[in-house]
Image (cartoon, rainbow, N blue to C red):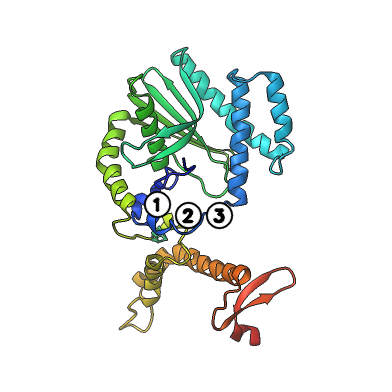
């Protein structure tokens, strides 16, 4: 069993926008960043604390495992403090579910199978609660980069679909609540939707796009979603879309019109991100694999190594 689905829930925003991307990046290996490893550790610590709260483990076992966790390279009191923010929120949600019905279903780190709509699709719900006709999914995001909203969030919606698929035969789920907790950004976002609307989205939007994506078909489309794509450095579509900005038709006026300036401003963030990605790729290839880029060389600085054109080096 693979640990990641080809059409993952976390990558849904991307593969739904650019359906050929999952197959296009398949041959490029995934680098696990230090941030990702830290996130995995934080999830494990949160699960441990909630397992104690739910009585799944006793205090003695908890203390033993917490002691082990504290020897981990990613452990710090600050990290634990942020994990506790999520744990407090999770306990609040558990209490709300139990208030609705005392035998609420409470699951930690549950594998959720949404493969009826997305071939081989599955993900992991950090906290899944089902009480009467209410399903609630709570997701911990430990990064401190970008705030993520629960509203219309494809990842959360796919997790919810997975829970309906896995438990819908036991519960008549009508309402879905989705909560994202980003403790390091002091950010909690919640959304609520009707189960029938979710199923309509799954049947009419998700399934056709997932079928295309699984086959590697459809149109390449660049955008903000490229930032987690493994071929973002060398993707032809992304390069072409960004280079279009450099090929704006500036004639006949000798200076830019207001409209053209707005056009440049609109594209500038994506253009800068793309240019930095290409530079980073070129640097890594040169530094790690000895790749020679004609006209460029690695420059040894006092504290850093960077990549520069030979003309600049000569200046
Ligand atoms: S970099 Fe962007 S455009 Fe290229 S395959 Fe990936 S998601 Fe699609």
In terms of depth relative to the viewer, which is nearer, 165 or 255?
A: 165
Q: Secondary structure at mark 2?
A: helix
Marks 1/2: CA–CA distance: 8 Å
Mark 3 lies on residue:
31
Figure quadrant of the C terminus: bottom right
Residue that appears at 48% across and 59% down: 28
**Comparing marks 3 and 1, which lies closer to the viewer?**
3
Instruction: Tell which circle, 3 or 2, labels the residue nearer the N-terminal end.
Output: 3
| Label annotation for residue 230 | none
Instruction: Tell which circle, 3 or 1, labels the residue nearer the N-terminal end.
Output: 1
**Comparing marks 3 and 2, which lies closer to the viewer?**
3
Ligand 1 falls in quadrant: bottom left
Marks 3/1: CA–CA distance: 18 Å
Q: Position of residue 79 (x, y in %)?
A: 67, 39
How would you rate the neighbour count of disc 2 (Cα within 10 Å): few for under 14, some for 14-19, many for 20 or more? few
Label 1 CB less than 8 angstroms from ligand 1: yes
Q: Position of residue 90 (x, y in %)?
A: 54, 27
Mark 1 lies on residue:
14
Question: Left of 49 or right of it: where is 104?
Answer: left
Mark 2 lies on residue:
228
Q: Secondary structure at mark 1?
A: helix
Q: Is residue 237 visible?
A: yes
In terms of depth relative to the viewer, which is nearer, 111 or 43?
A: 111
In terms of depth relative to the viewer, which is nearer, 258 or 310?
A: 310
């Amino acid at each position: 069993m693979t640990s990641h689905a080809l059409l993952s829930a976390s990558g849904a925003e991307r593969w739904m926008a650019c359906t050929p991307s999952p197959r296009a990046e398949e041959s490029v290996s995934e680098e696990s960043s230090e941030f990702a490893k830290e996130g995995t550790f934080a999830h494990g610590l949160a699960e441990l604390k909630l397992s104690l709260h739910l009585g799944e483990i006793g205090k003695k076992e908890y203390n033993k495992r917490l002691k082990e966790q504290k020897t981990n390279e990613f452990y710090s009191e600050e990290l634990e403090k942020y994990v506790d923010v999520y744990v407090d929120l999770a306990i609040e949600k558990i209490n709300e579910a139990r208030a609705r019905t005392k035998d609420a279903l409470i699951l930690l780190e549950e594998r959720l199978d949404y493969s009826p709509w997305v071939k081989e699709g599955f993900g992991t719900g950090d906290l899944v609660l089902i009480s009467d006709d209410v399903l609630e999914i709570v997701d911990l995001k430990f990064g401190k980069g970008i705030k993520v909203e629960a509203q219309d969030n494809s990842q959360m919606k796919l997790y919810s679909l997975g829970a309906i698929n896995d438990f819908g035969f036991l519960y008549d789920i009508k309402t879905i609540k989705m909560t994202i907790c980003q403790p390091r950004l002091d950010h909690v976002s919640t959304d609520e939707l009707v189960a029938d609307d979710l199923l309509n989205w799954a049947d009419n939007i998700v399934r056709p796009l997932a079928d295309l994506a699984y086959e590697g078909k459809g149109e390449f489309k660049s955008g903000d979603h490229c930032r987690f794509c493994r071929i973002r450095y060398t993707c032809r579509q992304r390069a072409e879309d960004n280079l279009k900005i450099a090929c704006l038709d500036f004639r006949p006026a000798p200076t830019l019109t207001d409209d053209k300036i707005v056009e440049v401003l609109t594209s500038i963030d994506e253009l800068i991100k793309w240019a930095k990605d290409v530079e980073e790729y070129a640097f890594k290839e040169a530094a790690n694999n000895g790749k020679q880029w004609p006209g460029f060389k690695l420059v040894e600085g006092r504290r850093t190594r960077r990549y520069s054109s030979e003309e600049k080096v000569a200046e």
